[in-house]
Image: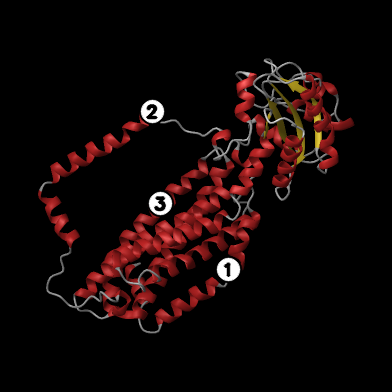
Amino acid sequence: MPRIGEVFVSGRAKWLVLGVWLALAGLLPFAAKLQSIENDDVVNYLPATSQSTRVEQLLREFPAGQTSTAAVVYARDGGLGEADLARIHAAQEDVPRKIAEAQPFGTIVPAPDGNAALFLVRLPHDPQRLLGDVDRLRDLAQGASSTGDVTVGVTGPAVFLAYQNEALKNIDVKLLTAAGVAVMVLLLLIYRSPLLCVLPLVTTVLALIAARAAVYGLARYADITVTGMSTGVLNVLIFGAGTDYALLLIARYRQELQHGDDAYRAMARALRQAASAIIASSATVALGLLCLLAATLKSDKDLGPVTAVGILCAVAATLTALPALLVACGRWTFWPSVPHKSSKFESRWDTLGVRLARQPRLVWVVTAVLLAAGAGGLADLQLGLPKANSFIGGFGDHRILRHRGAGPALPACRDAEIRQGLGAGYRGRDLVRGRRHSDCAAGAHGGLRAMDVLAVRSA
């Protein structure tokens, strides 16, 4: 590869290379379509053989279509009176008239201590309107509370999904902007050259367009599932890896320019010395990412090839497009600190390396101790974040937990939803195991504590 790389920067070849990458930039419309085919269905984040996956697949067969459940919570420390319960009941009956396709189900469920009550509402699972429906439901619930000492909260899966969709809106643009600014600042601090902080960024953007277009093709024709998570990781990974590889090549290229060679010969020597390390590094990362093909979750399994394609595009752009750009601009790429022939090639990093090499044992012992100290926190590491803490502002879960005691915040009536949604084509005994529908519909004391449905079979 080093010898082949030299061909890419010789004579007219560099312009041909740049022309090829400009042609690949024409794939931008396909790269932009990648977000439109993202599939963040919950089944992609579950094992294919799990019972939860089976239930989610059955839910798609419901005549009513996909819905999300919201819980409207009213709480007062001194206790809810009859007038409060009457207003809550009126608000429950008013939901279908104020919110299209919203369906309250079950009765008002009081808390054991009498200080809170809730009712459940099904909202259409439409990402485009879910947030608006949640806001209208909150306004309706707050309007039913005529006194200031009654606090109102709207919680449940529908609220979480609505705020999650809002938080992730245009996430690709935000990630790309943040990564691009970080790369430009980093390169400007390292080389203090305005042109040199642009060229690697241009190379990275070309690699990103090619990678996103390739992943779009894989998703359309190779049954690869692209999720919002994999797209975000792909964007950041290409910026990080592309910048890393560019720094390795640019550092070697600068050293060769200090030997007095012209731009072509300096780049040829730089590629001969740096390309092997860059290829080995990228191959290691790509193969490691492909190990995700053995994962159980489909989202993780398909993340492997998606990110591996990103690494391959990053290294291809670094070893072809970037050298061509650097040679085309010549020494003035490094302006105002243009490297010239010098008899002394040592930098501050060279001096540091020489000092470290004099005491290798001390260096690795100190390094090992620092790493061990840094890893000490793993003993008390707690992973995961409760949904109620996923946003800066809570939305009602804490009120349910305070008044309902231990157990899930939202009573799970999924079995009742399944029974209602199956219609005439299914028989009552098809519900293999679960609480009775009446337990949910009648608002049993405390509500259901877990979704017990295991499977439903067709009649």
Residue found at the far right of this picture: 424
Q: Nearer the viewer, residue 376 or 120?
A: 120
Q: Is residue 376 above or below residue 252?
A: above
Q: Which residue is mark 3?
A: 285
In the image, taking residue 174 as reference, residue 152 lies left or right, namely right
Q: Is residue 391 above or below residue 303?
A: above
Residue 28 badge: 1
What amino acid does circle 1 point to? Leu
In the image, taking residue 366 as reference, residue 19 lies left or right, namely right
Q: Nearer the viewer, residue 443 or 2?
A: 443
| Dot 1: element | helix
Please say which color scheme the image uses. secondary structure
Q: Nearer the viewer, residue 93 or 441?
A: 93
- Of callouts 2 and 3, which one flags the residue occurring earlier in the amino acid sequence? 3
Q: Are marks 2 and 3 in contact (CB under 8 Å)?
A: no
Residue 3 badge: none
Q: Which residue is mark 2?
A: 380
Q: The C terminus lies in which quarter of the figure? A: top right
Q: Is residue 186 visible?
A: yes
Identified at 77% across, 24% down, the residue is 84
On the image, the x and y values in percent for residue 186 come to 35, 61
- Of callouts 1 and 3, which one flags the residue occurring earlier in the amino acid sequence? 1
On the image, the x and y values in percent for residue 378 come to 36, 32
What amino acid does circle 2 point to? Asp
**Whole-number angstrom distance, CA of label 2 to CA of label 1:** 45 Å
Which is in the foreground here, disc 2 or disc 1?
A: 2
At label 3, counting other C-alpha atoms closer than 10 Å, the crowd grade (few under 14, some 14-19, many 20 or more) is: some
| Dot 2: element | helix
Quadrant of the image occupied by residue 270 = bottom left
